[in-house]
Image (cartoon, rainbow, N blue to C red):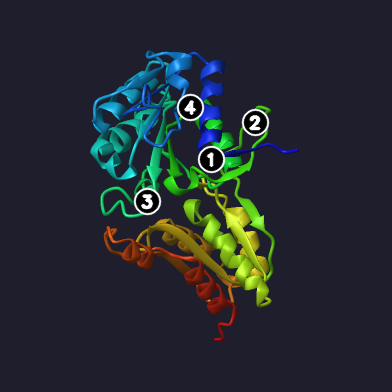
Amino acid sequence: MPREISFSEALREALAEEMSRDPSVFIIGEDVGVFGGVFGVTAGLYEEFGEKRVRDTPISEQAIVGASLGAALVGMRPIAEIMFGDFVTVAMDQVVNQAAKARYMSGGKASVPLTIRVVNGAPGSAAAQHSQSPESWFMNVPGLKIVIPATPYDAKGLLKTAIRGEDPVMFFEHKMLYAVKGVVPEDDYAIPFGEAAIRREGSAATLIAIGGRLPAAMQAAEKLAESGISVEVIDPRTLVPLDTATLVASVKKTKRVVIVHEAHRRAGPGAEIAAILAEEAIGYLDAPIIRVATKNVPFPYNPELEQYILPGVDDIARAVDGVVNYRL
């Protein structure tokens, strides 16, 4: 019987296994130690590995990333947790001007094996400063790898790859995925970056679903299947590097594409993917590329307003139906 565990448990397993495998791996962040993490991901690791390898910090993202960067430059493999992705802005200089550029500015002599776990997404009435999905902010920065898993299996395998790598990784974890369960092998495995996953085969349209919006995309695809529309759902898994070949191959087959993500629509990850497809797959398309994303407003506290601005199942289904029935 395949073993099913939650997204958060899969992350914890990856952390524990990599810490056991390599003594240079350590965790640093706010409440990651005694408290076990505000979302429970690091629960039990403090007791297993001790305070030197599971380090609680003051409330200072600048200090968390700065200390991690310094440790990475001298041979350690830090895993820094940013409790709410909104506050990674406090550490933007360390991420954007230091970690991302160290290899280049040292002529390849310096490596930065730093994994920054960033908790993103709207958890329900957390308002404007605790609900954002900032992954696209970092897609513009050469030197960073951008990982955004959507299943427990991928969470574990991609985190292992991040920890074992030699470059800085922004690893985005959606709050509402932590409780989601899925099949995760007990055997050691790692998932290469730059390989998208086809979550559902289809022929009428390609639906590219990023991170926390994958469950809604799968529901929309199921709903559309009831009306005879066959949707291919693709999960990029990593935004940098991006598996362009799989996306183009799917568009070549279906002739239509919708991109869904929880980041704001303007300059979100869907904008970059749409531009790539316009450059590399325009000859295959029979309809415009459509983006379904969070409306361009700050996140409201009111739960009904929050749901209104987020891209839901019906929004996705309407967009797919629109491109399938599009006529020049």
Q: Position of residue 151 (x, y in %)?
A: 57, 45
> Marks 2 and 3, Cα distance to the nearest angstrom?
28 Å
Task: Tell me the SS state at disc 1.
Answer: helix
| Residue furthest right in the image | 1
For label 1, the residue is: 7
Crowding near pointer 1: few (<14 within 10 Å), some, many (20+)?
many
- Closer to the eye: label 2 or 4: 2
Which amino acid type is marked by label 3?
Ser
For label 4, the residue is: 166
Task: Tell me the SS state at disc 2.
Answer: loop
> Marks 4 and 3, Cα distance to the nearest angstrom?
25 Å
Give the position of the C terminus as an image quadrant.
bottom right
> Marks 1 and 2, Cα distance to the nearest angstrom?
16 Å
Which amino acid type is marked by label 1?
Phe
For label 2, the residue is: 189
Q: Position of residue 27 (x, y in %)?
A: 41, 23
Tag 4 or tag 2, which sits nearer the N-term? 4
Corner quadrant of residue 203: bottom right
Q: Residue at x 51, y 30 (%)?
A: 12
Crowding near pointer 4: few (<14 within 10 Å), some, many (20+)?
some
> Marks 3 and 1, Cα distance to the nearest angstrom?
18 Å
Tag 3 or tag 2, which sits nearer the N-term? 3
Corner quadrant of residue 58: top left
- Closer to the eye: label 1 or 2: 1
Crowding near pointer 2: few (<14 within 10 Å), some, many (20+)?
some
